[in-house]
Amino acid sequence: MAIGMTAKSMGWRLAEGLVVVAIAAALIEAASFGALFYSDQLPQAAPAARLQVYEAVLVAGRDAISTRKNVRQRWVTSDFDVQIATNASGYRENFEFKPSDLEVAFMGDSFAFGHGVEIDDRFSNVFAARSQAILAANKVASLSYKNGFQPEHYEYFLRKNPDIRPRFIVISLYLGNDLESDVRETRFNRQDLSLELPYRRIENGVVVNNTPFRIPYFQHLIRISYFFRLVAILVNQSTFREHFFETDGVLPNTPNSEALELGTLNGYAARAFDALVAIRDLAAAWNGRVMVVLIPQNFYLGALTNPHIRPQLVGRIPEILRTGGLRAAVREKCEAVRLECIDTTDILVAGDYYRLDPHWNKSGHHKVGEMLFRYFLQNGYL
């Protein structure tokens, strides 16, 4: 009888223990959900709207990139609150147009897409509004994100769409990831005209990292648990990041390497410039002209809350500013390969970037849009 009571007592203790563990797990999951939600890391949180605009990305077996059509969604973060909308063709424009009819086509990634600003405040739309007395509204448009997000993608897009032959192509080149990170994760074959992004995938309408983890089944845990998702994000933002993924894996949107940031162009940067030159030569065949808008990282404009640079280089920002770093190397490269590059650094100040988000705010976009309009006028392009 005593033995039966002991077994029953142990059973109750086990049940109580399981209940405590379940409650603790539920509390941890709830706390993790709250942390993710308020840090803008949940797919259902409004800040993911930009990523949810994607319909498909370039992966093995796919050779097209597109955005969803007729999207209407708000995008809210601690820095901004904007409306994301695409037209019937999937472009972020508030009018319909045929890309083959464009006279001025803007190409680029998040800056060209208008990350964090309303569509009318985007620099390409500011340019269009200023030039509307000369160019019809439907002759100037942004092809951003439909054209990819680094120079090889833009070349691929134009080669796949030979009917698109604008008089002017304005390409945004962000020094923060267009010369290394985005190129490194891209597999582009110019001869076969194929392009793949094996390190990105779509999950619940959001583009996520597809780099394999060192820990078996960790990716599965991230999918089913807010806690493990939070752990992954925190580790991914720490100095332990390099130990988190397989050694041969490529991590999307990583900061520039130290050597590149200090001004030594590498093979990835060479690939980006090869694509820019190829686009220039493509355009020359139809008497078109290509301009490259150089977009500096926020730290070039002064001390900011969240400088977009590798953490170990933060202390060397004064040195980079003094020597010119990557910005100076890119300007020299533009001259060497005879690319028409427009450096926006001199017209911008720290206040033209968001406090936490490393993109331009409304002020930055308006300055650049006005700068481009005046550049076109001064060079007799309009």
Image (cartoon, rainbow, N blue to C red):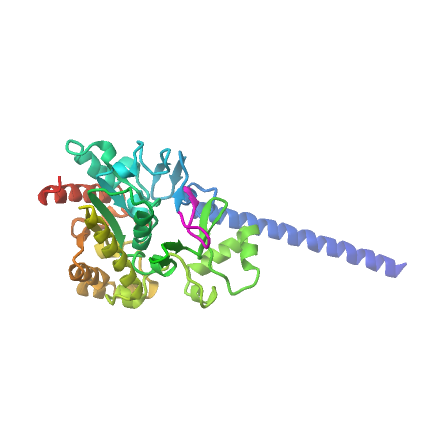
Please state if 32 lies on the left or on the right of 116 as rendered: right
| Pick the front one: 142 or 203 | 142
Q: Where residue 98 appears, x then y in whole percent?
A: 30, 35
Magenta stretch: residue 51 in it? no
Q: Is residue 282 above or below residue 73?
A: below
What stretch of residues is rendered in magenta?
Answer: 53-64
Q: Where residue 126 appears, x then y in whole percent?
A: 22, 38
| Pick the front one: 138 or 218 | 138
Residue 269: quarter of image: bottom left
Please state if 85 lies on the left or on the right of 26 as rendered: left
Whether residue 354 is visible = no
Q: Where residue 33 appears, x then y in whole percent?
A: 52, 47
| Pick the front one: 217 or 350 | 217
How many marks the image carries: the answer is 0
Q: Where residue 114 appears, x then y in whole percent?
A: 30, 42
Which residue is located at x 65 percent, y 54 percent?
21
Residue 151: quarter of image: bottom left
Which residue is located at x 80 percent, y 56 percent?
9
Please state if 227 lies on the left or on the right of 352 as rendered: right
